[in-house]
Amino acid sequence: MNVSADIEQFILSELTQGRGITEIDASENLLSKGIVDSHVVMELVGFLEQRYGIAVGDGDLSPENFESVASIEAFVGRKRNGQT
Amino acid sequence: MLMELLYQSASSRPDDVALVYRDERVTHAELLDRAERLAAGLAAEGIGPGDAVALLLPNDPTFVAGYYAISGLGGVVVPVNPAFKQDELEFYFRECDVRAVISDDRGAGVCERIVAGWDEPAQVIATSAAHGQALTVDMLMQAEPAKLDKRSAEEPVVYMFSSGSTGRPKRVARTHGQVRGESEYYAWMGIAPEDKIFCTIPLFHTYGMGCCMLAATRTAATLVMLEDPNPFLLRRQRALELLEAEGVTIYPGVPFNFRLMAEAPASADLSSVRLAFSAGTALPRPFFDAFLDKFGVPVRQLYGCTEAGTLTANLDEDPVATFASVGQPVEGVEVLIEDEDGRIVPPLTVGEIAVKSPGLTSGYSDMEELNRQAFRDGFFLSGDLGQLDEEGRLTITGRKKLLIEVGGYKVDPIEVEDVVVAHPKVAEAVVVGVETKVQGEELIKAVVVPNDELDERDLIGFCQQRLANFKVPQVVEFREEIPKSPLGKILRKYLI
């Protein structure tokens, strides 16, 4: 499973139950749709840290890194390449 | 009656900015025009006096225009948390017998599914036609604006819901006179047309409705709305930028906001902020100190409740010395402390907080027994514990009701228990709040006696389908039995 599909699967199975959401477009805005809210954002961060062996710092916590599956994938890619 | 606030601000300051939202600046006159157009559009769809209309919207100009439009028509506004799941929304809609729902894109589909099976039709009005909705806010606003009639002080204008005691939230109706009465506090507090009020707390909540929306409209101040404030962890930098760029003067927030801003990697110049308020739950001293150290702004505590709106505010000259106090009652509000027998206790003695206020509801809808217990001689027994000092400052010390504090929300454990025990593999369950390493914030833990093999994720998923995320247990503990006293009372202290 590629990173994008992996992230989408996590969001669908863990964060969106009860909303009737069965798929997420990679560019869909997870923040404005309330899929990633204050109560699940740290769950998502924990998943990324554990799954990809990255450390998410305070400075990484911006909407640009988490607003869509595509932006999360790009963020994970940067972290794995040692970029900030 | 409430709409008069908007007529006054549009008349006294027509060209001043009422709302800042993204790149949009809406003047008081434009806000009035939007409210009148929307009211005319709603009236054309058959909405009239006494009809309940739900607002399932984020903080944005449509929420504000919608609120005043419905109130101006004599309808009853039902502000609802957009994070609610289908079952929760249906409960609120049915309790209020809503005739229409104004929803943004993400909620419109769920609302249509809910009302589709109703005998009495209810309309879903979407903020756009993105998902093929037949009726949109833009369509309604094509109507010609018309001045709205005055409403009487006794007419209900808003239905909100209060948690605690009963499992299901209790409906609180407040009238034009009561909400208008609350609006006067904000002028008394010295909020003026030159002020800019920052809005990150939800307008569907009493605190946001009062301290942000009513305060701004009553005083013709500007409401600076942070778009998409959640998750605040990701939005704190934008919040800091907006506070500085707009020269915000008043900031009502919750402890969670102030902590995250104090911990943010970047800083901002918040020297324009003359009043920062914290409410919803007690402000821990470390958060107060961290915010003061970083930004030079002391956060003052404020106290209110769904039943009455704002009640007290710490407006002391030296808020550092009295940081733990939620302040003295605002003008027109009386606060008493009572013992278990209903006798008033002397200063510095802890008891239950009783309040009397022009903003106070007349009681919970359809709950006579509870009303007899909670409303007495014009006072409301809040269920909170506290004490008054010699100068009449109130300090909250605890509460009688079982509630769990989660990120500024109060969660009724009984409501969560009702969902947990509905799982077919749960024989018995108790839900408790567990302190986290962050002072003042709790985790929701479900202690469960299963009657079959049950997986934690399965149970959490079951709850996620039925409850808003902030009510879902984060931890499940399996036990063979729930500890109880000889009389069968659950011993919650052994579950925390």
Image (spheres, helix red, strand yellow):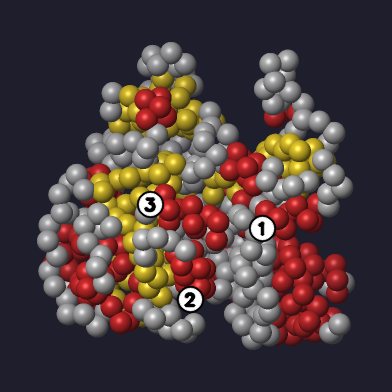
Residue highlighted by disc 2: B105
Does label 2 or label 3 sit earlier along the sequence?
3
Quadrant into which the C terminus of chain A falls? bottom right
Q: Secondary structure at mark 3?
A: helix
Query: Going by the image, does B112 lie left or right of B362?
Result: right
Mark 1 or mark 3: which is in front?
A: 3
The amino acid sitting under disc 1 is Gln
What label does residue B96 carry, if any?
Answer: 3
Q: Residue furthest front?
A: B119
Residue highlighted by disc 1: B464
Mark 2 or mark 3: which is in front?
A: 3
Pointers 1 and 3 within a single chain: yes
Q: Nearer the viewer, residue B461 or B439?
A: B461
Residue B403: where, in percent of width, then height?
57, 38
The amino acid sitting under disc 3 is Cys
> From what the image shows, is residue B26 above or below residue B357?
below
- Distance Cα–Cα, label 1 vs label 3: 24 Å
Q: Nearer the viewer, residue B149 or B61?
A: B149
